[in-house]
Amino acid sequence: MSSIFNVFSLSFPNPRVTSSGHGDDDDDDTKMYQHGIPEIPTDGKVALLKNSKLKSEVYLIGTVHISKQSAETVKKVINYVKPDVVAVELCRERAVDIMTSSLKDDVTLLDMLYGSMMCPWGLSMKIGVFAEGCWDRKLRANGILQGLEFKVAIQESSRLGARCVLIDQDCNVTYSKISKVFSWGMLWNSLFADHKDIEYTRSSVQEMTGLMKKHHPEYTKVLVDERDKFMFEGIRSFEKKVVAVVGMGHMDGIELLWRQAEEAENKKPPIPSQERGKGCIHGFIFYLLVCTFCYGLIL
């Protein structure tokens, strides 16, 4: 099944934010998002997260799923970092869907309609699935492949011998939850929204997410917040060098959870030196007892 996340993310008002004219805010963002990768802008689309507990480094890449530039950024970062792990915002079903996307070329509108009507959710969701299929069909006709950055990440990880990990929640779990909060009004907005003037930057995506939380809080919780936490827990567990590829709308949530985890880790009290000394003494006494016992056995 095609990903329907993109169409359903378009069911709220759009900001008119571009990347220019932010003044001092741009300077602050540049300082915040230093990552040390040549030819990659420090505009917030790539962030370096450090795990003080595991001593790992995570290069978090925020992408736009219909952007060829995002795919190019993913390829550049992976080839520069040469990570041990490449994590992608996919579950197994979506990964198979993206890696076999060329097979969709022969799918007819009738096939798409039949497939959407067979989905186990309400009518508004069924129509949403069909709308996503039509949208994807139009993009493909214009040479645009949804999720190309994920396909590139999987291919590059294989080429470099890195471990590729699928970190997203099962899409069927997400779809089931969405079906309980998705409305006809949201479907209407997604079908007739105008997105031609949007320039996807960290600022514009943050504003879009803010509007979505304001107008559709339950929907945002399912589509964004719960998946932020799910993916964060996966990314946080990796060791060594990691490149994680997620939609730009997930960056704020993952970064916030990361900061909270680091703060909690730093607040843990160190082991007192006196306790460490006791541990050494106890260990030494145990060692002497073992040696004495063994010595008695061989005499």
Image (cartoon, grey):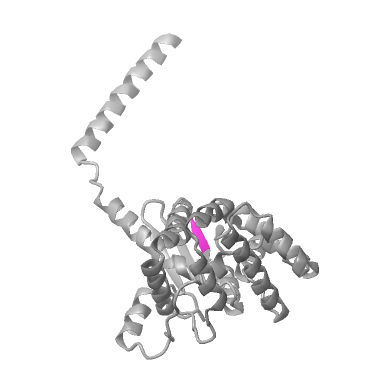
Estimate the x, y position of residue 281 in percent, counting from the top left: 25, 29
**Quadrant (top left, top right, bottom left, bottom right) of the N terminus:** bottom right
What residue sits 41% from the left and 90% below the top?
20
- 249 or 214, which lies in front? 214
Point out the stretch of residues depicted in magenta: 240-244
Left or right: 182, with 3 as reference point: left
Please name the predominant secondary structure of the magenta segment in the image. strand
Seen at 28% across and 23% down, the residue is 285
Give how far across and how far down residue 22 sits, in percent. 35, 87
Residue at horizontal 43%, vertical 62%? 220
The quadrant where residue 175 appears? bottom right
On-image quarter of the C terminus = top left
Q: Is residue 68 left or right of residue 29?
A: right
Residue 63, percent across and down?
53, 72
Residue 287 vertical position relative to residue 14 in the rendered view, above or below: above
Q: Is residue 97 left or right of residue 273?
A: right
Whether residue 153 is in magenta: the answer is no
Q: Which residue is drawn at 63% across and 58% down?
A: 94
Which of 159 and 234 lies nearest the eye of the viewer? 234
Note whether 172 is above or below 131 in the view shown: above
228 or 39, nearer to the observer = 228
Q: Is residue 230 visible?
A: yes
- Quadrant in the rendering for residue 287: top left
